[in-house]
Amino acid sequence: MAELDPATEAYFDKCRTKIGFVPNVLQAYAFDLSKLSAFSAMYNDLMLAPSGLSKLEREMIAVAVSSVNRCYYCLTAHGAAVRQLSGDLVLGEQMVMNYRAARLDTRQRAMLDFAVKLTERPFEVEEADRAALRAVGFTERDIWDIGAVTAFFNMTNRIASATDMRPNAAYHEQARTLPL
């Protein structure tokens, strides 16, 4: 890991305060602060910025794509996020194993079918696929966001596999029980 500049140290401190740890993906990128900055900016824009997609829907895309790619890091981390955001302990596991087993609404199912097709067979994506998204209420901007989140996690899954990135242990424990 490179020596952290004050801005990166502040970012890592914010992670420790907000979630209790620095995600290993950020630590993995910390060998090159410009790469970490670019990764973080893109992640924050795609996953946290205003969008026609909810945060849960974006996390669902992350998990569906990561399931196709069998990315251990992202399945663990983003499966936990699906559990947390949905409040549904089973949904996170269904998404990890096979999103088609989950009781999703028509919109979510169309979104994930598109993301998976874009992951597995991008050369087959055509206007009929985009029309199917529009038919369930997605806008052109939403379709862009679905594509961008899908592409980002395909890239991230490959970096995680290439570098043997391992999820923080805390992800395995998150949102495993219902509140009392």
Image (spheres, helix red, strand yellow):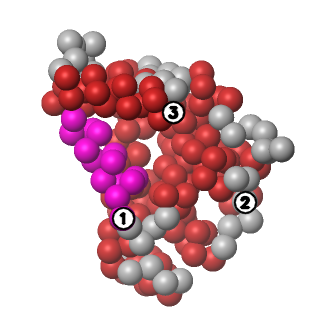
Q: Nearer the viewer, mark 2 or mark 1?
A: 1
Magenta: main secondary structure: helix
In this figure, which residue is indicated by the disc labeled 1?
50
Q: Is residue 16 above or below residue 113?
A: above
Compared across the picture, whether 177 is left or right of 100 comes to: right
Residue 154 in picture, x, y percent from top left: 39, 45
Question: Is residue 128 at all visible to an observer of this figure?
Answer: no
Relative depth, front residue between 112 and 129: 112
Relative depth, front residue between 5 and 159: 5
Q: Are marks 2 and 1 in contact (CB under 8 Å)?
A: no
Residue 27 in picture, x, y percent from top left: 35, 21
Determine crowd level at label 2: few under 14, some 14-19, many 20+ residues with C-alpha closer than 10 A: some
41 falls in the magenta region: yes
In this figure, which residue is indicated by the disc labeled 2?
102
Quadrant of the frame with the C terminus = top right
Compared across the picture, whether 142 is left or right of 38 comes to: right
Instruction: Answer with the quarter of the image where residue 165 lies.
Output: top left
Compared across the picture, whether 77 is left or right of 40 comes to: right
Q: Residue at x 74, y 58 (%)?
A: 101
Q: Is residue 152 above or below residue 140?
A: above
